[in-house]
Image (cartoon, rainbow, N blue to C red):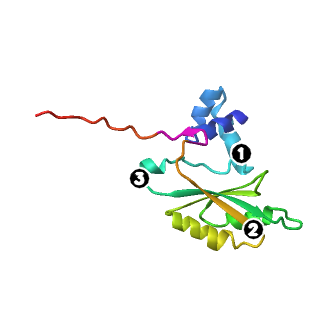
Amino acid sequence: MNDILKLLEQNSRYTARDLASMLGMEEAAVEAAIAKYEEDKVILGYQALIDWDRAGEEFVTALIEVKVTPQLGDGFDRIAERIYQYDEVESVYLMSGAFDLSVIISGKTLKEVAQFVARRLSTIEGVTSTATHFILKKYKEKHCLFRKQEEQKERTLFV
């Protein structure tokens, strides 16, 4: 059944009929498996991966390294939960290495992201330091390549 999950992760628009055909299964069995995955919260949702640059929308994305003091009994969980409540936050990961949490946020401008870090993130009790890295260009995300737009060839018209 993990084959269903792998295919849906590649393309969440596959229908049960598509998946059944690809996997040599009955469509009803695929539908039942997907319903069970959704009920068990194995499948958390379905999303489209958008190249916002091509769509003409300007966003600033930042990866923020966060060092925290773990909380007695809760470790890093309580602070992580506090951070992921903010709408700006896209992802929060517990990390090994030089910092504790990796937080990915988006905003309309550099200033908006900087203000989020200064006013909200760094003021959370238990957060001891942050380091913000702005993402300048996406090349690949979730197995999808971001390709540069085809440059138009210059045409010269002789009169």
Could you tell me if residue 1 is visible in this image? no
Q: Earlier in the sequence, mark 3 or mark 1?
A: 1
Q: Residues within 10 Å of mark 3 (few under 14, many from 20)?
A: few
For badge 2, the amino acid type reads: Val
Q: Which residue is drawn at 77% across and 54% down?
A: 98
Q: Examine the structure image and report whether residue 65 is included in the region drawn in magenta.
A: no
Estimate how packed mark 1 is, as few (under 14), some (14 to 19) or many (20 or more) residues with alpha carbons within 10 Å: some
Which residue position holds label 1? Answer: 37
Furthest toward the top, the residue is 24
x, y percent for residue 12 = 58, 42
Q: In which quarter of the image is residue 125?
A: bottom right
| Label pair 1/2, CB-CB below 8 angstroms | no
Going from the N terminus, do you reach mark 1 or mark 2 first? 1
Q: Which residue position holds label 3?
A: 56
Q: Which residue has dot 2 on it?
A: 127
The stretch of residues the image draws in magenta is: 140-147
Q: Which of marks 3 and 1 is in front?
A: 3
The mark lying in front, picked from 1 and 2, is 2
